[in-house]
Image: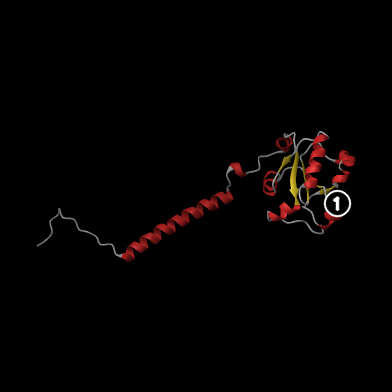
Amino acid sequence: MSKSKSQSKSKTVTPAKQSNTVFIVAALVVVVIGAAAAFFLVNPPAANTASVNTTDLMANEDPVLISPEAYNTEFAGVDHYLLDVRTPDEFNTSHIAGAHNISVDLIASRINELPTDKPIVVYCRSGNRSSQAAQILDEAGFTGVYDLGGTNQWTSAGYNLCIGC
C-alpha cells in the first residue's frame, strides 16, 4: 500500500547530523562575535575616546587621588605637568617617562617654576611625599592637582618605569 497524501513523511536526524548542526551554529556565533570585536577595535565607541581636555582637568579645586589606570586613560594626549617629588638620586635611578623632578622638600621654594595653566600630576615612591606635595600645591592656590601615589602602585599595576632615560 502506498501512503496517502495526508500522511507526512518523518525525517530521521542522525547524531552525526545533529553534531554538524551544532558545529555550524557554534562557528557562526564565533564569526559574529569576532566580527563585532574587530569592528569595535577599529571603531571604538565614542565614550572610549579621549574627550577630556585640560580645562576639564583643571576644574577641581582640591587635590584628587588618581590610580595609574585612570592616569593613563584620562591624561593620554592631554597637556599636563607630571611631577616626581622624590630626591634627584631616586629620580635618576628610574621614573615615569616624561616626568619633571622637584623634591618635595624644595616644592615651596620652587613653586614659581610650576605651570598654573595645566593640570599637575604628582607622584613619589609610596604616595606619602606626593600627598604632601599635593597639599603644598593646594595651599598655594593651584587647581587641577592630581596625586598619582607612588611608583610602587605604578609598577604593581603593570606599568614600566623609565630607567636611565
Q: Which colour scheme is used?
A: secondary structure
The amino acid on which the numbered mark 1 sits, given as a three-letter code, is Thr
Q: Position of residue 142 (x, y in %)?
A: 80, 35
Residue sitting farthest toward the bottom: 16
- Residue at x-position 58% and y-position 51%: 41
Residue at the extreme left: 1
Horizontally, residue 42 falls left or right of residue 120, namely left
Coordinates of residue 18 in the picture (x, y in percent): 33, 62
For the question of whether residue 81 can be seen, the reply is: no
Residue position marked by numbered label 1 in the rendering = 87
Classify mark 1: helix, strand or loop. loop
Determine the residue positioned at 87% across, 45% down: 105
Residue at the location (61% across, 44% down)? 48
Q: Which residue lies furthest to the front in this view?
A: 128
Q: Residue placed at 44% from the left, 55% from the top?
A: 29
Exactly how many numbered labels are in the figure? Answer: 1
The quadrant the N terminus occupies is: bottom left
Does residue 130 lie above or below 15 as drawn? Answer: above
Q: Quadrant of residue 62?
A: top right
- Give x and y (percent) for residue 86: 83, 50
Q: How far across and how far down the image is residue 127, in percent?
A: 76, 48
Mark 1 Cα within 10 Å, few/some/many (few <14, many 20+)?
some
Q: Can residue 92 be seen in this view?
A: yes
Which image quarter is the C terminus in?
bottom right
